[in-house]
Each structure stands twice: as structure tokens, then as C-alpha cells.
Image (spheres, helix red, strand yellow):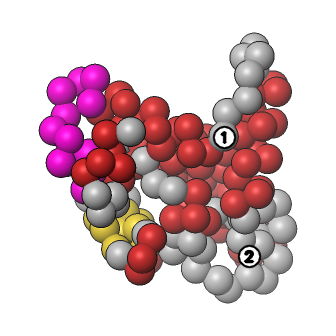
Amino acid sequence: IRDRALLESLYGTGMRVSECTGLKMENVDLTNKKMLLHGKGDKDRLVPFGSYCQEALQRYFEQTRTPLMEKYHRDHDLVFVNHYGNPLTPAGVAYILKQIVKRSSLHTSIHPHELRHTFATHLMSNGADLRAVQELLGHSSLSTTQI
């Protein structure tokens, strides 16, 4: 349940792994399908997410995160946690992706940043404006988005 919410969040928003592991509960608005991400250079940005991400997060909060936080008496506000209610680390996110790929029929490796790149590529191939993609990704330079 957590892994699905994690994947939907990474791919559905294009967030960086550091933004994902630092995401706080108070910055996720399930009703309006928006997240406030704290990005590079201390810059915050509001990003939308779709219904798949919304449903995955709702299920994760109700069925996994809340029970873990109660069971292990954790009181931090970070969204993504491990099986003991402790915050996920960037290495933990990479490990989860590695395990998902290992269980699948894919014979490759996927790094978290590739989901961010895929998010941007899919937006661009479906006609999104380059400047809009730049804002969603939190790039300060348009040339970074064009890579």
C-alpha cells in the first residue's frame, strides 16, 4: 500500500526524492489534490496530483501510516515511513523501487530520478508548455528542463 502511494506520488508530481522524504502531512491536501513541496534552494512550490495518487495516498494514510504511527508511538509529521513508523530515507526509496522492479517482469533497474524524468517527458509529449513543466519541476532555469 505504501509503495503504491510512493510510486504514484513520485511519478504523479515529478517530485525529487528529497522532496518526497521530506514531505509533511500538513502539506498534502487530498481534497484539492495538491502538495506543497519544499525544494532545492529553500523554494516551495504547489503541485497538483491526479486521482490515482489521491486514492493511493488516502488508502496509505488510513490503512498503513496511521496504524504504524500509533503502534510505534511516533509523532513526526513526515508522510512516508518504513515498517517501524520511522521516516523513509532517500536510500530507502531507492531500495523500494529496486524491490518493485525485482518482483516485476522488468529486467532493468529504475532509479527514483527516472520517475521525475518520465513525468516531465510524458507532460511534454502530451503537449504541455515547457514553462509549465519547468514550474512543476521546480527548475530555476529553463535549460535544465530541456535536458
**Residue appearing at x 71%, y 71% in the figure:** 87
Q: Nearer the viewer, residue 70 or 83?
A: 83
* Residue 52 pos. (x, y %): 43, 38
Q: Residues within 10 Å of mark 2 (few under 14, many from 20)?
A: few
Measured in 3D between alpha carbons, the distance from the residue under mark 2 to the one under mark 1, in whole angstroms, is 31 Å
Q: Which residues are magenta?
A: 124-135
The quadrant the C terminus occupies is: top left
Residue 102 falls within the magenta-colored stretch: no
Is the residue 72 above or below the residue 126 in the image? below
**Residue appearing at x 48%, y 43% in the figure:** 116
Instruction: Tell me the tag on residue 70.
Output: 2
Is the residue 38 above or below the residue 112 in the image? below
* Residue 54 pos. (x, y %): 41, 48
Which kind of residue does numbered mark 2 sit on? Glu
Quarter of the rendering containing residue 47: bottom left
Is the residue 130 above or below the residue 21 in the image? above
Q: How many marks?
A: 2
**Residue appearing at x 53%, y 39% in the figure:** 115
Q: Earlier in the sequence, mark 2 or mark 1?
A: 2
Quarter of the rendering containing residue 108: top right
State the predominant SS element of the stretch in magenta: helix
Secondary element at tag 1: loop
Q: Nearer the viewer, mark 2 or mark 1?
A: 1
Residue 126 falls within the magenta-colored stretch: yes
* Residue 97 pos. (x, y %): 71, 40
Which kind of residue does numbered mark 1 sit on? His
Q: Is residue 25 shown to the viewer in this render? A: no
**Residue appearing at x 76%, y 70% in the figure:** 85
Q: Which residue is mark 1?
A: 111
The quadrant the N terminus occupies is: top right
